[in-house]
Amino acid sequence: MPQTNPPTPPAHPFPPPACDRDARYLEAAGRGALTLVTEYGAPRYCEDRSGPHTGYLAPPPPELFTAGWLTRDGNGAITAEGRTALTDYRRRRAAADALPYTLTRNPCRAELHRPDEPIRRLRHATTGEEIRPGHTVTDPSGHPATYLGPTMRSDDGGATWTPAFNARVTYPDHGTWLYPPAALGTVYDQEPAHPNPAAP
């Protein structure tokens, strides 16, 4: 029996899911606030009148037209397929927003660790001596730098902050840098130390 190969599926059997960029066009078109400015039949730019001030956007990506999500008439009307794609985008975005996430405080801020927050103690890898914020450390190239403290992270939207495992150092002329503690010949304690309560 002769061997037959299965038919090759098309490269893009369905339009890809709408992304953040696509959703902005679809949102404006769904509110009837998107105007396509064309020249010689081709979109030149868009006016988004959905807010208090007119916003000017680049022309919509061609995929929005080829997928049938937008029409090419003067007001950039959204189609039924476009509304379905926008609904699917909103559902996926809501599910993504509901996932747990971690915030990292600006790690390149040139300030010492706050004394009222927990800290992970940094120690010399060989002697075990503690290195406090403000002390001098030696970077991997042998240059002195001022240790500022560990990076800080939050798992509850910024309500509380805990120290992470990268060291912030600063140079007089080169700004703030991050290093893993091993690059500085140091090691962090596994458990963070909490600040002493203020005396009444």
Image (cartoon, helix red, strand yellow):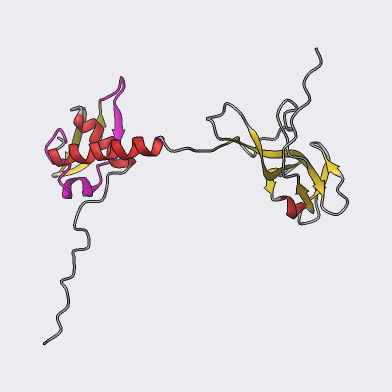
Q: Quadrant of residue 56?
A: top left
Magenta stretch: includes residue 67: yes
In terms of depth relative to the viewer, which is nearer, 143 or 2? 2
Residue at (60, 35) in percent of width and height: 105
In terms of depth relative to the viewer, which is nearer, 167 or 96? 96
Q: Is residue 116 above or below residue 99?
A: above
Q: Residue furthest bottom?
A: 1
Q: Give the x, y percent position of residue 178.
A: 68, 46
Q: Give the x, y percent position of residue 100.
A: 47, 37
Indicate the quadrant containing the C terminus: top left, top right, bottom left or bottom right.
Answer: top right
Q: Give the x, y percent position of residue 25.
A: 25, 36
Magenta stretch: includes residue 111: no
In terms of depth relative to the viewer, which is nearer, 168 or 189? 189
Q: Quadrant of residue 94?
A: top left
Q: Main secondary structure of the magenta part?
A: loop
Residue at (73, 39) in percent of width and height: 120
Can residue 96 be seen in this snapshot? Answer: yes
Left or right: 194 in relation to 79: right
Q: Residue furthest top?
A: 200
Q: Quadrant of residue 146?
A: top right
Q: Is residue 118 above or below residue 6?
A: above
Q: Give the x, y percent position of residue 128.
A: 86, 48
Residue at (17, 50) in percent of width and height: 66
Number of dots carrying numbers: 0
Indicate the quadrant containing the N terminus: top left, top right, bottom left or bottom right.
Answer: bottom left
Residue at (15, 71) in percent of width and height: 7
Q: From which residue to which does the magenta span run?
A: 50-76
Can residue 45 be seen in this snapshot? Answer: no
Left or right: 142 in relation to 81: right
